[in-house]
Image (cartoon, helix red, strand yellow):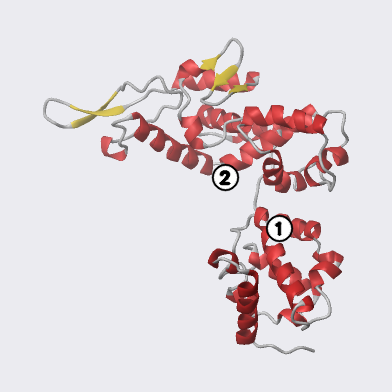
């Protein structure tokens, strides 16, 4: 049995990082208390898995890298793997690498462990309807916001920048700066419903230099902000207006415990599912979490949907969707 204390592990990791020529940022994946305070050479499989989860931001407080995001798992796993390989082959301290030798420490197994701890909401076409039915305040606004993110709007800033003349109610499309998204009849109906209800205010000064709330020149934007007093909101120019609207959109979604990323990724995945109707659930899920490289036919279909949602790189987009697929009704 090899016995190292925390200081000795830290020095060993520093020696490894120097040997590899790591930058300060690269070395920081390993040179942190949650790593070198562990008895690295004498852990059991469960403890090694727990270490990786801590390194990715789960089950640990100090020094985690990854902020609870599975995209950092591969990086963390790569660094710890290389360290153990160096200890085995260059230093002859250990005889095996647990991350290579144990199936329970494979990338796929650990990925699912990370995803299981993620607090995300996976939504479907009928989920939006069910949520809308339960909303009492700001019903038309919230339904419109949800459906816009679900059907292709990337973020609050993009939503805030939509102008009424960007919307084609005949062809059911919305023209954005970099693309055109197709809209469902339910989204079009929610937009029309919202437009009938809202008024828009700004701050202006009357003859006594007192600020009053009046109609503004920004009425061409889809989202209308209503403020109780002029000092609540600075909308002296369009950039300030869009910035303020973006913040307000996030607050509105919080009132129903949702966020735009969950809505957008869920909508994207379900749009792909509709495109691959001939696939059974296992075949569909293997697009995201399978080990085989995707064929050109699948990539072509993916790119078509990605273009509507404003995504660029195929595999980066797929990786961002993996948690939602694993937690979806399709992966059972």
Q: Which mark sits nearer the N-terminus, 2 or 1?
A: 1
Given residues 40 and 211, the one toward you in this image is 40
Residue ID for mark 1:
74
Q: Is residue 65 visible?
A: yes
Mark sitting on residue 59: none
Picture coordinates of residue 96 (x, y %)?
83, 76
Q: Is residue 326 left or right of residue 199?
A: right
Given residues 1 and 227, the one toward you in this image is 1
Picture coordinates of residue 182 (x, y %)?
63, 21
From what the image shows, is residue 17 above or below residue 170?
A: below
From what the image shows, is residue 277 above or below residue 118?
A: above
Q: How far separated are the C-alphas under marks 2 and 1?
A: 30 Å
Q: Secondary structure at mark 2?
A: loop
Picture coordinates of residue 321 (x, y %)?
70, 43
Residue ID for mark 2:
257
Give neighbour class at mark 1: few <14, some 14-19, many 20+ (Cα, 10 Å): some
Give neighbour class at mark 2: few <14, some 14-19, many 20+ (Cα, 10 Å): few
Residue at 78 percent of width and 82 percent of height: 92
In what quadrant of the picture does the N terminus appear? bottom right
Q: Secondary structure at mark 1?
A: helix
């Amino acid at each position: 049995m090899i016995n190292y204390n925390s200081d000795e592990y830290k020095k060993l990791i520093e020696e490894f990082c120097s040997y590899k020529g790591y930058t300060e940022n690269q070395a920081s994946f390993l040179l942190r208390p949650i790593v070198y305070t562990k008895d690295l050479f004498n852990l059991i499989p469960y403890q090694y898995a727990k270490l990786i989860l801590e390194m990715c931001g789960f089950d640990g407080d100090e020094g985690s890298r990854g902020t609870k995001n599975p995209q950092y798992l591969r990086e963390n796993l790569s660094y710890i793997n290389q360290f153990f390989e160096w200890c085995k082959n260059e230093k002859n301290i250990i005889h095996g690498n647990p991350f290579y030798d144990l199936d329970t420490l494979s990338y796929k197994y650990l990925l699912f462990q990370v995803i299981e701890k993620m607090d995300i909401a996976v939504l479907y076409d009928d989920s939006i309807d069910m949520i809308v039915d339960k909303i009492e305040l700001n019903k038309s606004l919230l339904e419109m916001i949800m459906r816009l993110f679900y059907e292709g709007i990337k973020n609050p800033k993009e939503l805030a920048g939509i102008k009424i003349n960007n919307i084609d109610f005949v062809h059911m499309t919305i023209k954005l700066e970099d693309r055109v998204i197709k809209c469902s009849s339910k989204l079009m109906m929610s937009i029309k419903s919202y437009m009938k209800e809202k008024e828009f205010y700004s701050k202006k000064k009357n003859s006594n230099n007192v600020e009053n709330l009046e109609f503004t020149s920004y009425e061409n934007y889809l989202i209308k902000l209503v403020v109780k007093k002029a000092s609540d909101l600075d909308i002296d120019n369009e950039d300030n207006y869009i910035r303020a609207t973006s913040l307000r959109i996030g607050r509105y979604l919080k009132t129903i415990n949702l966020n735009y990323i969950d809505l957008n990724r869920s909508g994207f995945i379900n749009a792909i599912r509709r495109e691959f109707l001939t696939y059974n659930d296992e075949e569909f899920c293997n697009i995201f979490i399978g080990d085989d490289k995707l064929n050109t036919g699948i990539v072509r279909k993916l790119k078509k949907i990605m273009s509507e949602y404003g995504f660029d790189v195929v595999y980066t987009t797929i990786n961002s969707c993996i948690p939602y697929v694993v937690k979806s009704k399709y992966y059972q």
